Amino acid sequence: MSIFVRIWFGFSLVLLIGSFFILSSLQQQIKPNIRQVVEDTLADNANIIAALVADDIAGGLVKTPEFDQKMQATLSRVLNAKIWNMQKSAIHQNLYITDQYGRVIYDSTGQYTGQDFSRWNDIYLTLKGQYGVRSTRTDPADENSSTMYVAAPVIYQNQLVGVVSLGKKGQSVQPYIEAAQRQMLIKASIVVVFSLLLCGFVAWWLKRSIEKVRQYALALAANRQQQPYFYSARELNDLVYAISSMRQQLEDRAYVEQYVHTLTHELKSPLTAIHASAELLEDALPIDDQQYFARQIQQQTYRLQDLVERLLLLAKLEKSDEAFELQALDLNVLIHNLLAQRKGIIQQRQIEVQTSFTGSCLVQAEPFWLGQALANLLDNAISFTPAGKTLTIKLERVAQHLVLQVINQGPIIPDYALSHIFERYYSLPRPDTGLKSTGLGLTLVKEVLDKHQADIAIENRADGVAVSIYFNA
């Protein structure tokens, strides 16, 4: 079972158990609370009636038919009241009146007239000057058969002349109790269902968020990914930051190890050549041989310098997580400036350069890095163009792209090398000298163009090689 299902199940179980106990407690409180309200109302009514019938009791009128008719007419009034969406059409109360000794002198039901009620709590306590109330069941086994009686003293000329006890059956308020319990159950069920859905959503959100963190951690193993951000989840953001920091530290260590290893490997060949040439120069050699080995030392020194500079440049590019700050750049101007800087080597190699620029040459780019990339591309094209051949540079708009083509006449790239041409330290021998370069130039070109979201393609042609760069227009 998934941990997130367990979390949801645990939350749900706690919620259901807690809701059950709380709801049970509230359900049990409804009945006594309603009965308290009923008792409060009966106490008010009993005291009002006691004040109204004081004169009748003192004058002995409560025993007359007229008094009974008046009371029966009052208690049998037809009502049209809607209470809590329940229709009330009759008065559900009865009363009896006792004299100052507790003997019943009037009973609205006609059952208890003449009986001694002085021992019932409602009458007994009221005669003693206390608050009198009782609840009596007609069926001891049925709690709903109880009738509540609340008594009030009848005072006439500062003398206790009797007691009025007002009764209300429990069955008359039972519908309200059941309605309140039913409404509470419905609302509690809605709250519980909503809470369960909310718990499910939280568990799903937590699972989805942690899955994002997991995918981010896995993706970091292959390449750089944009860090996910979670609103109202500082702990998850801290976790993402911790993973990113850990990856950065491990990557930095691996990066240094890789570069130390590769740099050591790449430095070995030129250092060996310099060392061998220096040893030979210690001997007495003809002047031509001395000049030859001196040139070898000079060439290898230049190669070492070029290797270190390009490694530093590529390292700076690869370790930067920030996006380039792009600005409008005229490729026409940039390319002509780069060609002007290489005018000497072009003339020395007797290469003919042809340029063709059509339409707008503006592109959104980072000037320094794009200049470095195109400089490496031109250097590579010049070095593979034999003397007397042509180097063609075209710039035109095709559909949604601005396409830059650098075409050099010369030997084609072997098929086995086409898929490796952008790999680090991969290089082919130059056609005139047979020497290889650092193998970092085209790697730098590819890295820079990726940062510009531009595509590059290399293809062989009948008389040479064409490199095409596709910028987003």
Image: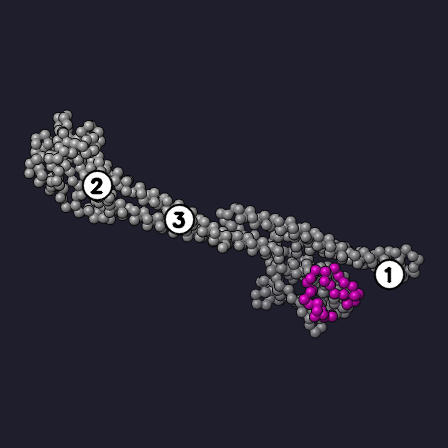
Q: Residue 60: where, in percent of width, then height? A: 8, 32
Residue occupying image coordinates x 14% and y 29% = 101
Q: Residue 261: where, in percent of width, then height? A: 73, 55
Which residue matches tag 1? 292
Q: Mark 1, residues whose alpha carbon is within 10 Å: few (<14), some, or many (≥20)?
A: few
Residue 377 visible: yes
Residue occupying image coordinates x 31% and y 43% = 28
Separation (CA) of disc 2 from disc 3? 36 Å
Residue occupying image coordinates x 38% and y 51% = 193
Query: Exactly how many numbered labels are in the figure?
Result: 3
User: Label 3 sits on what residue type?
Assistant: Leu
Q: Mark 3, residues whose alpha carbon is within 10 Å: few (<14), some, or many (≥20)?
A: some
User: What segment is highlighted magenta in the picture?
Assistant: 410-438
Task: Say left or right for 163 vs 472.
Answer: left
Dot 2 or dot 3, earlier in sequence:
3
Residue 391 circle label: none
Q: Residue 316: where, in percent of width, then height? A: 67, 53
Magenta region includes residue 430: yes
Dot 1 or dot 3, earlier in sequence:
3
Residue occupying image coordinates x 67% and y 69% = 459
Which residue matches tag 3? 16
- Decide which of 2, 138 is in the foreground and name it: 138
Task: Say if mark 2 contacts mark 3, CB within 8 Å.
Answer: no
Secondary structure mainly formed by the magenta segment: loop
Quarter of the image with the C terminus in it: bottom right
Task: Say if mark 1 contacts mark 2, CB within 8 Å.
Answer: no
Dot 1 or dot 2, earlier in sequence:
2
User: Label 2 sits on what residue type?
Assistant: Arg
